[in-house]
Image (cartoon, grey):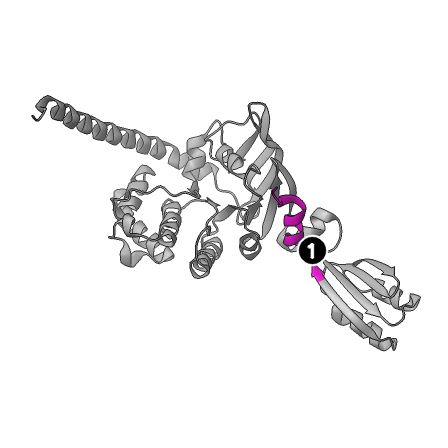
């Protein structure tokens, strides 16, 4: 027998749930709209100026530090990479940045807004693409983006144009009316970037944006990031454990290990900044080593250190200077029997800090 009362109760519950969701959306949008004008006034940070500032930032769980006394500044207009293995503290740092968890001590600000005390204002100017995406699978791409636009207080008259704009940027405009449940993983990642862009963020945080994607799709996403950074001046914070991703896309990098920031340098000076020596190690084996040859090699620009052992010269430098070294050897009538070069950049760092047991 059909339980009519039970069905009526379920129907009333469904109506109540939908009513509560609409009420939540209305209140959220009102809050966003009230703060929107103040956000625009206070968050007008010029290119190259600090956008994110973390000071002595610490987060402990049961007495164990997930993030330990982290100090970091990220400037507007950068593509900044946060590199580290799983469990390094990257996700906890992002949660504190977004105001989703409170630091145990220290503070973090975004465009002058305190993430703990003013989380709504931080979220208004920040887009976040998590590693695990959460879309309504039974809605179309357009419907998902429309819902995000409404939540962020975008005027109704502008929404459809914004949806079309961001879908064209990520190459999904031709499938905007398809259900998200029919999308591949790569398409969902691109939709995630569109979802981030819909509110014109100053800051976009991308957590493992190319994880699990084939090379072609991954490169398309990286190209999109570069274009958006250049044309829209969006600051990107990319969190990843992938060495190749960080090398390809980031202009500056912070390296996390066991909750600590162990390095923060420009990508082209990465190993020099961490290890205190040059990026390249060049080994030269010659028939005979003279003091004159050693002195001339030491005088080459970008040489950091020159070592000698038997008939092998080890040169540590900031650039690949093999042509200059070869010329010196030939000019001094020496026989070159071997010359090897080793790039001690990110791969060395991975082996030194990130190798997991």
Residue nearer the viewer, 187 or 115: 187
Q: How many marks?
A: 1
Q: Which residue is drawn at 32% across and 50% down?
A: 162
Question: Picture quarter containing residue 7?
Answer: top left
Question: Picture quarter containing residue 281?
Answer: bottom right
Q: In this view, does 157 lie above or below 328?
A: above
Asked whether residue 354 is drawn in magenta, I would say: yes
Residue 350 location in percent, x, y?
Answer: 63, 49
Q: Which range of residues does the magenta coloring cover? A: 342-357
Q: Which residue is drawn at 39% across and 33% down?
A: 35
Residue 312 location in percent, x, y?
Answer: 84, 64
Callout 1: helix, strand or loop? loop
Q: Quadrant of the N terminus?
A: top left
Residue nearer the viewer, 33 or 305: 305
Q: In this view, does 209 lie to the left or right of 163?
A: right
Asked whether residue 157 is drawn in magenta, I would say: no
Q: Is residue 157 above or below residue 249?
A: above
Q: Mark 1, residues whose alpha carbon is within 10 Å: few (<14), some, or many (≥20)?
A: some
Question: Picture quarter containing residue 55?
Answer: top right
Q: Is residue 5 above or below residue 308?
A: above
Residue 267 location in percent, x, y?
Answer: 62, 53
Q: Is residue 86 above or below residue 291?
A: above
Q: Which residue is drawn at 87% across and 78% down?
A: 333
Residue nearer the viewer, 242 or 50: 242
Residue at mark 1? 344
The reply to whether residue 225 is visible in this rendering is yes
Residue 34 location in percent, x, y?
Answer: 35, 32
Q: In which quarter of the image is the C terminus?
A: top right
Q: In this view, does 188 lie to the left or right of 282?
A: left
């Amino acid at each position: 027998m059909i339980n009519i009362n039970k069905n009526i109760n379920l129907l009333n519950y469904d109506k109540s749930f939908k009513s509560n969701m609409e009420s939540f959306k209305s209140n959220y949008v009102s809050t966003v709209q009230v703060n929107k004008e103040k956000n625009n006034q206070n968050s007008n940070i010029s290119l190259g100026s600090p956008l994110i500032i973390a000071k002595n930032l610490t987060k402990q769980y049961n007495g164990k530090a997930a993030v330990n006394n982290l100090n970091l500044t990220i400037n507007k207009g950068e593509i900044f990479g946060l590199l580290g293995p799983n469990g390094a503290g990257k996700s906890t740092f992002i949660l504190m940045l977004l105001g989703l968890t409170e630091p145990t001590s220290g503070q973090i600000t975004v465009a002058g807004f305190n993430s703990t005390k003013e989380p709504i204002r931080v979220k208004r100017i920040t887009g976040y693409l998590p590693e695990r995406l959460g879309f309504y699978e039974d809605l179309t791409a357009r419907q998902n983006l429309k819902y995000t636009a409404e939540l962020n207080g975008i005027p109704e008259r502008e929404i459809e144009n914004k949806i079309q704009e961001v879908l064209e940027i990520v190459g999904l405009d031709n499938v905007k009316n398809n259900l998200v449940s029919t999308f591949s993983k790569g398409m969902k990642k691109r939709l995630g970037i569109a979802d981030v862009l819909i509110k014109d963020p100053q800051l976009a945080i991308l957590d493992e944006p190319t994880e699990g994607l084939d090379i072609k799709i991954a490169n398309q996403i990286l190209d999109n990031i570069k274009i958006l950074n250049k044309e829209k001046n969006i600051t990107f914070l990319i969190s990843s454990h992938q060495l190749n991703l960080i090398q390809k896309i980031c202009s500056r990098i912070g390296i996390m290990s066991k909750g600590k920031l162990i390095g923060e340098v420009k990508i082209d000076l990465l190993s020099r900044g961490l290890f205190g020596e040059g990026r390249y190690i060049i080994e030269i084996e010659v028939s005979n080593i003279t003091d004159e040859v050693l002195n001339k090699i030491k005088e080459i620009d970008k040489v950091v250190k020159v070592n000698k052992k038997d008939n092998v010269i080890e040169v540590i430098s900031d650039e690949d200077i093999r042509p200059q070294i070869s010329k010196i050897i030939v000019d001094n009538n020496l026989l070159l029997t071997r010359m090897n070069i080793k790039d001690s950049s990110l791969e060395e760092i991975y082996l030194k800090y990130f190798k997991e047991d």
